Image: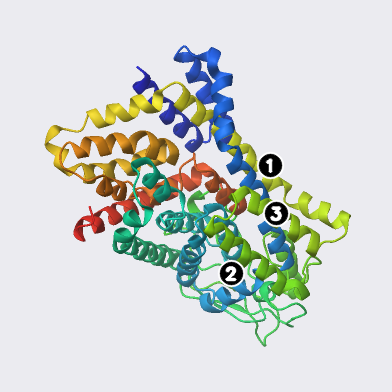
């Protein structure tokens, strides 16, 4: 009975948020509370919730101070050079922008923390997506999938948990998996290329001049151009964009029929990559001339744009902030102190040095309070879900039902079975629940057929590409929150691609004889 209720509870939650019948926060709280009563353990609900909050409190604290720290670093201009570098590489080409997103997310993921990865990636890339009217869901999909593959580094969560649960060395698990993970990462880059091509087909290939508003948004402070220049080349759905011409200003109306929303609030027919109504498409590339004042107004409407003239910039402290961030990430990788403590100290130092006056510090904290509240609130709401799943015994019953359902003939192939099961299970439950509750059972079943625990541990890492988009992963709320997209929209768009990436990792593991 607990097994059935566990699966029904998870399915109910996913249906409600994907159909937008409830917000993720409300669903994370109310759905498990209802099912806790249905299993006859409503009297223990408070105990389960407090246990869940106790388990996730360090994560909530880490996210809270990490958001403040990286928010301050964004304010003072630490990541502006990264944006300018990506801008030069991307050249307003949707393919280059999406591939650049994947590369940036993969590189930053080396710190082993998904929240850090998403904060840096979204801050650097979102202005490009919004300015060029690209689908923000493409960005969240590529960033989450790339981070999921890279999340398997030994100092990340999954490998460490697998090693602890099965009493193995993390290096022994991870190093042989490198070829398969490399194939998975290459597939993510290929996926980025495919999605970028779809965006290019929808929008057209854009050419960007240094005078454009986007270029000015990320240029060095004080840089100014007389005329913005942005031209659309090809693409039946190419938006009307700014062009400079000797014939004087002219304007073509940018209506909803001619331009996708690109606001990230939902996919919409025109906001989905590779889609478009043939009846709406203009013939040829639409063009329009935009004044510098219009461009400035557009930039002002986009709070994510990195304005080169914002008063929070601290160019004289750039190298101090860079050194502070490098030191923080180094200590994080070395695990010198708990991650929440590191970010707490880092946020305090960053605020004190960059904004020595108390009103300025309060203003910076207030500026990022919305993100802090949204993400930390979501983490504590997720604690209700995980607390009820674990406390009522649903997770244990679900795990044993799945293991018992494996035919005896598949016993010698338990590593493959583990890899396949890791894809849905790491999505429907936390890493702690999977690695400490299910992996030991799978390892025990494999040992009875001569499958080593090391192979089981390696196979258990396969599903991480999908896991990073799980509603039980706190970092994903940082991603969708900063990108301002609905979690349900992100889930619908990402799940298929992420699951396919996991299957590629599994196939590569089999091809290389790793499992």
* Crowd class of label 3 (few under 14; some 14 to 19; many from 20; radius 10 Å): some
- Give the Cα distance between marks 2 and 3: 47 Å
* Crowd class of label 2 (few under 14; some 14 to 19; many from 20; radius 10 Å): many
Q: How is the image coloured?
A: rainbow
Decide which of 502, 167 is in the foreground and name it.
Answer: 167
Nearer the observer: mark 1 or 2; the answer is 1
Disc 1 marks which residue? 373
Mark 3 element type? helix
Residue ID at (53%, 14%): 42
Decide which of 221, 163 is in the foreground and name it.
Answer: 163
Disc 3 marks which residue? 345
Q: Residue 72, how many percent across, how many down?
A: 72, 59
Disc 2 marks which residue? 240
- Give the Cα distance between marks 1 and 3: 20 Å
Q: Residue 86, how many percent across, how many down?
A: 55, 74
Decide which of 348, 229 is in the foreground and name it.
Answer: 348
- Give the Cα distance between marks 1 and 2: 38 Å
């Amino acid at each position: 009975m607990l097994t059935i209720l566990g699966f029904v509870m998870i399915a109910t939650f996913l249906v409600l948020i994907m159909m937008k019948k409830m917000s993720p926060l409300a669903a994370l709280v109310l759905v498990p509370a209802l099912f806790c009563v249905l299993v006859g353990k409503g009297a223990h609900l408070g105990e389960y919730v407090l246990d869940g909050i106790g388990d996730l409190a360090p994560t909530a604290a880490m996210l809270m101070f990490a958001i403040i720290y990286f928010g301050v670093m964004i304010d003072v201009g630490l990541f502006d050079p990264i944006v300018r570098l990506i801008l030069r590489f991307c050249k307003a080409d949707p393919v280059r922008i999406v591939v650049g997103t994947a590369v940036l997310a993969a590189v930053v993921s080396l710190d082993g923390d998904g929240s850090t990865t998403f904060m840096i990636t979204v801050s650097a890339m979102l202005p490009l997506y919004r300015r060029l009217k690209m689908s923000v869901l493409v960005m969240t999909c590529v960033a989450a999938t790339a981070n999921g593959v890279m999340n398997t580094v030994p100092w990340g969560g999954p490998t460490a948990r697998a090693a602890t649960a099965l009493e193995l060395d993390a290096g022994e698990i991870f190093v042989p998996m490198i070829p398969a993970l490399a194939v998975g990462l290459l597939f993510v880059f290929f996926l980025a290329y495919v999605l970028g091509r779809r965006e290019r087909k929808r929008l057209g290939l854009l050419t960007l001049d240094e005078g454009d508003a986007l270029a000015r948004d990320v240029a060095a402070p004080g840089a100014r151009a007389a005329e913005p220049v942005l031209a659309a080349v090809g693409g039946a759905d190419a938006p009307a964009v700014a062009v400079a011409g000797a014939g004087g200003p002219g304007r073509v109306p940018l209506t909803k029929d001619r331009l996708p929303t690109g606001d990230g609030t939902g996919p919409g027919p025109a906001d989905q990559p590779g889609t478009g109504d043939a009846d709406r498409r203009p013939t040829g590339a639409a063009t329009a001339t935009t004044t510098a004042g219009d461009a400035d107004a557009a930039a002002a409407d986009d709070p994510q744009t990195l304005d080169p003239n914002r008063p929070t910039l601290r160019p004289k402290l750039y190298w101090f902030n860079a050194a502070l961030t490098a030191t923080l990430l180094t200590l994080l990788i070395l695990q010198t102190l708990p991650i929440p403590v590191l970010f707490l100290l880092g946020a305090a130092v960053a605020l004190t040095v960059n904004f020595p006056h108390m009103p300025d510090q309060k203003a910076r904290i207030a500026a990022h309070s919305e993100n802090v509240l949204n993400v930390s609130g979501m983490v504590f709401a997720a604690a209700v879900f995980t607390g009820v799943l674990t406390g009522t015994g649903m997770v244990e019953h679900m795990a044993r039902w799945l293991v018992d359902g494996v035919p005896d003939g598949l016993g010698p192939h338990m590593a493959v079975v583990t890899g396949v099961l890791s894809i849905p299970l790491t999505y429907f439950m936390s890493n702690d629940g999977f690695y400490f509750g299910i992996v030991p059972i799978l390892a025990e079943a494999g040992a009875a057929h001569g499958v080593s625990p090391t192979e089981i541990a390696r196979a258990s890492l396969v599903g991480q590409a999908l896991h990073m988009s799980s509603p039980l992963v706190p970092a994903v709320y940082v991603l969708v929150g900063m990108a301002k997209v609905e979690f349900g929209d992100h889930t619908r768009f990402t799940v298929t691609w992420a699951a396919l990436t996991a299957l590629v990792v599994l196939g590569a593991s089999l091809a290389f004889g790793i499992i």
